Amino acid sequence: MKLKFALVGLLLFIVLPSSAAQSRRRNTPDADFLRAGFLAAFGNDFELVKDGITPRTNEQGGGMYWLAYVKARQPGYFSLQYSFKRDDKHYSHEEREIHITVAPKGCRRGPPSSGVYPRFCMGDTIIIPVFIAGATSHQFELKKQAPAADEDWKTFDEKYPNFRDRDLDKTPVENPSESLRYVGRRSHKMLHRKPGYTLQLFADFEAVKPGKFNLLVSSSAYGGPAGKTPAGSIPIIVVDRSTSLTLIAGREEVRGFTMGHNGQEYVSSTSGNSYMTSLIVLQPGDRVSFLYLSAIRSPRFERDGNARRDGFDPAEATAPVISVHPFALETKYDFGAWLVDYLP
């Protein structure tokens, strides 16, 4: 009899969802609710092209998002803010704010910064992520600033082009890429608090023509199988200035609010999120730099006479080895899965 009751209890445990799982489902808003709130706040300034709820795997970092695919109706500076309540006794509610700059069609977006794009062009589709896992009562708010009448959108054009090649070693190296022009290499030493340093070598490129490929820049030749895209290579797409893209509004500010003993809420934490991808989208004229060698030098390295008296590290003479491979975008660990179906 005891065994029978044990088996029944085990079956109930397996079949019935846990209270935590039930709570997560109950506290996940539906797409209709989110869409209505979003359009009420943003509909005059952004066209909602499509939307949907997208979970992320544990490998990707977990969580669940409602993704809004939008197109700006006019250029300007926008602050997209949303707030929600969540299952956390430490916070009364949370606010997230995404800043978006939209320039005229054909603008210079500039290369990404830490996997995030700082600017979008008219005609681009912008993916706005809204966090919904364990969150309820979403509210949306838009703040905007129109561009000045004499707005100069050439922020990413070189103001001092004569200085960008300074300190570059322009010794030619073999470069199989037709879309990126190799312009030279440079070194940088990061001094340690105690004697010693970290040496870093970078290879600089300039986009010259459209193309789609993975680039591997290393200190030695790639020895893997031909036709296979190696790990660590960088997915790159070069497009014309007139090409519209789908990209993620990838950086947001996060503010957590706590209810004080006096009944007043206060900001109790601030942080930031970045929805980074490994994808690099460039336009002709854009410049990018890739690290291809990093070496940590201890105090003993110099004491043993491995460096010249003028401070030159022998590794600084290492030239980059460049190889081009079939295009492949990482989708397993970052947010590239949100873009893979919308690549130009």
Image (cartoon, rainbow, N blue to C red):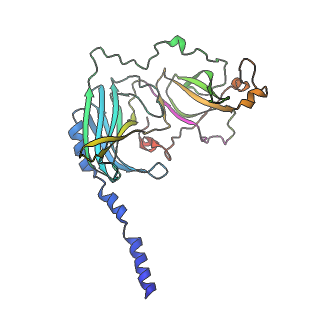
Magenta region, residue range:
224-240
Res. 76 image quadrant: top left
Q: Across the whole image, how many numbered discs are drawn on residues?
A: 0
Camera-nearest residue between 170 and 250: 250
Q: Is residue 242 visible?
A: yes
Q: Position of residue 227 (x, y in %)?
A: 62, 40
Res. 338 image quadrant: top left
> Split into 4 quadrants, where in the image is the N terminus?
bottom left
Q: Position of residue 238 (x, y in %)?
A: 48, 28
Camera-nearest residue between 209 and 167: 167
Q: Is residue 248 visible?
A: no
Q: Position of residue 46 (x, y in %)?
A: 26, 34
Q: Image height check: is 5 above or below 333? A: below
> Split into 4 quadrants, where in the image is the C terminus?
top left
Q: Residue at x 31, y 54 (%)?
A: 28
Q: Image height check: is 192 above or below 53? A: above
Q: Image height check: is 106 above or below 216? A: above
Considering every residue shown, the one lying at the far right of the view is: 304
Considering every residue shown, the one lying at the far bottom of the view is: 1
Res. 87 image quadrant: bottom left
Q: Position of residue 328 (x, y in %)?
A: 53, 40
Considering every residue shown, the one lying at the far front of the view is: 262
Q: Residue at x 30, y 27 (%)?
A: 77
Side of 203 relative to 122 (left or right): right
* Main secondary structure of the magenta stretch: loop
Residue 29 magenta:
no
Q: Residue at x 54, y 16 (%)?
A: 164
